[in-house]
Amino acid sequence: MPPKRPDVLRGLSGRLIADIDRIERTRNYLWPGSVTLALESWVRYADSPARRLWLYDSPVDECECCPHPVQQRRLLDHVVSALPRKSARELRKRLQALDDLY
């Protein structure tokens, strides 16, 4: 039985998941699971009413356990540009829906 997909990846095609996996293994700025983490971070942030309270110029450095959602969104832009055309279009569509919430 294949492993369950994280909730944030549900509804995405197998082709996109495979392309994300390949990108995570071949890019030095990514690691396995980093795109899922970035997408989860952006989903939580874009869907939360508390996003308006986020401090962009916080003097405290961020830690790995709570990445900055806007930086994670930028990372997703880099991933979209590295994906093949069909997969990029699918991920861009998902991100656009979240951006509309933001």
Image (cartoon, rainbow, N blue to C red):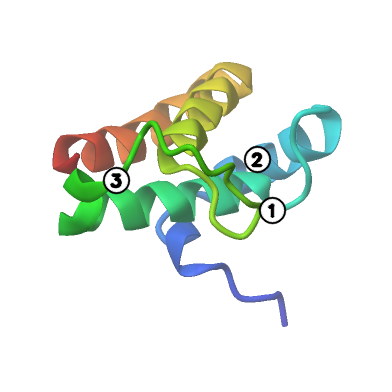
Q: Nearer the viewer, mark 2 or mark 3?
A: 3
Structural distance between the alpha carbons of marks 2 and 3: 28 Å
The kind of residue on which mark 1 rests is: Gly
The kind of residue on which mark 3 rests is: Trp
Of 2 and 93, nearer the camera is 93
For the point 84% across and 30% down, the residue is 26
Query: x, y percentage for residue 1?
Result: 72, 82
Q: Which residue is mark 1?
A: 33
Quadrant for the C terminus, please.
top left
Structural crowding at the residue carrying mark 2, measured as other residues with C-alpha within 10 Å and reported as few (<14), some (14–19) or many (≥20): many
Which of disc 2 and disc 1 is earlier in sequence? 2
- Residue 42 visible in the snapshot: yes
Q: Which residue is mark 2?
A: 20
Q: Nearer the viewer, mark 3 or mark 1?
A: 3
The kind of residue on which mark 2 rests is: Ile
Q: Quadrant of residue 4?
A: bottom right
For the point 83% across and 38% down, the residue is 25
Q: Is the C-beta separation of discs 1 and 2 under 8 Å?
A: no
Q: Work out which residue is located at the far front of the displayed protein and give it.
A: 59
Residue 54's mark?
3
Structural distance between the alpha carbons of marks 3 and 1: 25 Å
